[in-house]
Amino acid sequence: MESISARNWPVGKTSSDPSSGDAGAHLSPMVDVSQWLEAMPQYSAVLSFENDQINVLNANERFAAAFSRQQELTGANPTTSSEWIERVRQFVQSNRICDSFELRRDGKLGPEYFMCTLGRLPADANHPELYLLTATDRTNERTIEKNLRRELLSDGLTALPNRTGFGEEIDDRIANTVWPDNAQFGIIAIDLSRFSRVNESLGPMAGDELLITVAKRLKSSLRQGDVLARIGGNDFAIFARLNNGLSDALHIVQRIKEALSSPIRLSDLQIRVDCAIGCALSTNLSDDPDDIVRKAQAAVKIAKRSGKVEIYRNGVLKEAQRRFSIESRLRDALAQGGLSLAYQPLIHLQTGEITGFEALARWDDEELGHVSPVEFIAVAEESGLITPLGRWAAYEAAQTLSRWDAKFGQPMPVGVNVNLSPIQMARDDVASMFEEALRYSGIAGHRLTAEVTESAIIADPDKARKLLFALKDLHMPIAMDDFGTGFSNLASLHSLPIDILKIDRSFVSSMLEDRDKAVIVRTILSLAESLNLKVTAEGIETQELAHALQQMGCWQGQGYHFAKAMTEQDAFDYWRARWNFETV
């Protein structure tokens, strides 16, 4: 067969006369209306409106099966019947050409949904106006949508509402529940302690089993109308209606504690579940539920530190928001070199010479301004940023000594003390960190002193012992900071490679006015002498204190009486001036 190009396809000339289909046109009498309706894929029917009644003149079999004429028009299902008939009546009496609406009705297997459309058919003197009703079954689509929505709003593990679903449940309860006068609602946030240890030790399957069991127990402690949700990995929350304010919330907390009091069996182990609980109460029903949830989460963070149930108080959320801002900005500052080290001199109390400096982190942020070390170090420990912060401080302190040596022309007879956080000691390879810092800077290990706290040693004595001996292999001196505030026993102190005890400022600063503290200082000095340890006194702010400690035989001191912490250049100039003076 010879093919013909589309470009050369013969085209016939069209007529300018209108084709059939003008206003007076009707369906060909060769095709009956019922045949047209049967050919339509939708549920279809032709309706008339006479004497304020809706009549079904013709319909296909699909329509007859889904919308039984007898059932609908006789009112066997009056709710559904009246709904679609009323919509048709409104359409007839309007001037609209077409309309659509969704119809929901109860079927044998549950709710059924139909998308209905209405349109006007042509009319003339011999034919009254008729109406075409079509309906498309959307039950499957709505069921899929419902299932997807349920998945989006619920936790797949516990089947509880998730964070988003929790918010919708709260909105629904507030809007559709009859509340007595002066009623309020509360949010109780629950954080499972040490949950990560279960995952690490027993595996994620055991962790999932623990969460499911906890969810069941928490659910058993609820009252009617309360809502339980899993809003995070190991975080749960309860929405509670409070007719009696805080007393109702505390009653629920007590029920929660009782529900979690007995151990949970996982494999062959009995796991005791500890949790931190924080509560936030609304002032009235118009309060934003999301805001109350955030306040409860802020309270539970405090509960994790205090070990007690915490009730949100004004200002806590602002504190939490500031901690979040500090964490975010601190992360950027560590990446971009936004922090600096200040150096406070350590003074030999018998000779007055500078024996070294303590390195102290300082931070001035463009948005936050000056941030106190007490504030940003606490946030760093909470967020895990203490590890990069500690590494930066160790490297920077070692490099500072290297730069000072270059200015002086030879190694200076001073060292720098670097503080170690207990969290950094637990999480980081501290020995390798110091080894790298010394190697990169080219300074000897005896010039970098590691300051550790009693709490770091008590938390994990075996790990702390290995670390301290590893530091001694680098020839680094080790100082125990804040000595006297912890619970170290003499046996462990004697067995550890400690070189220096630093008496906490809380004992030193008021020892002249408080006889008991003076006795404590003398006892520490006597203990150190018997163990062949050196002692540094912190917080020396007056000449009288310095003289008294000198008379007691204290080796070294630091405090505002001698100098505040200063920049790297100022610290070098301060040492150089004192060194020149002392060697003349």
Image (tube, rainbow, N blue to C red):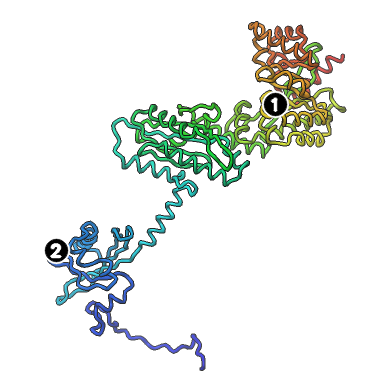
248 or 333, which is in the foreground?
248
Q: Nearer the viewer, mark 1 or mark 2?
A: 1
Measuring from the top left, give residue 279's x and y in whole percent.
Answer: 45, 31
Query: At 33% from the left edge and 31% from the top edge, which residue is drawn?
Result: 243
- Please determine whether, in this image, residue 324 is positioned above or below residue 139: above
Q: Could you tell me how many numbered marks the image carries?
A: 2
Question: In this rendering, does residue 404 appear at all?
Answer: no
Q: Is residue 69 left or right of residue 173?
A: left
Q: Is residue 264 left or right of residue 528?
A: left
153 or 249, which is in the foreground?
249
- Tag 2 or tag 1, which sits nearer the N-term? 2
Question: In this rendering, does residue 446 appear at all?
Answer: yes
Measuring from the top left, give residue 276's x and y in whole percent.
Answer: 51, 32
The quarter of the picture where the C terminus appears is top right
On the image, which quarter does residue 390 sit in?
top right
Query: At 41% from the left edge and 57% from the top edge, which residue is drawn?
Result: 145
Q: Residue furthest bottom?
A: 1
**Residue 457 marker:** 1
Q: Is residue 311 left or right of residue 87?
A: right
Cα separation, mark 1 vs mark 2, equals: 91 Å
Q: Which residue is mark 2?
A: 52
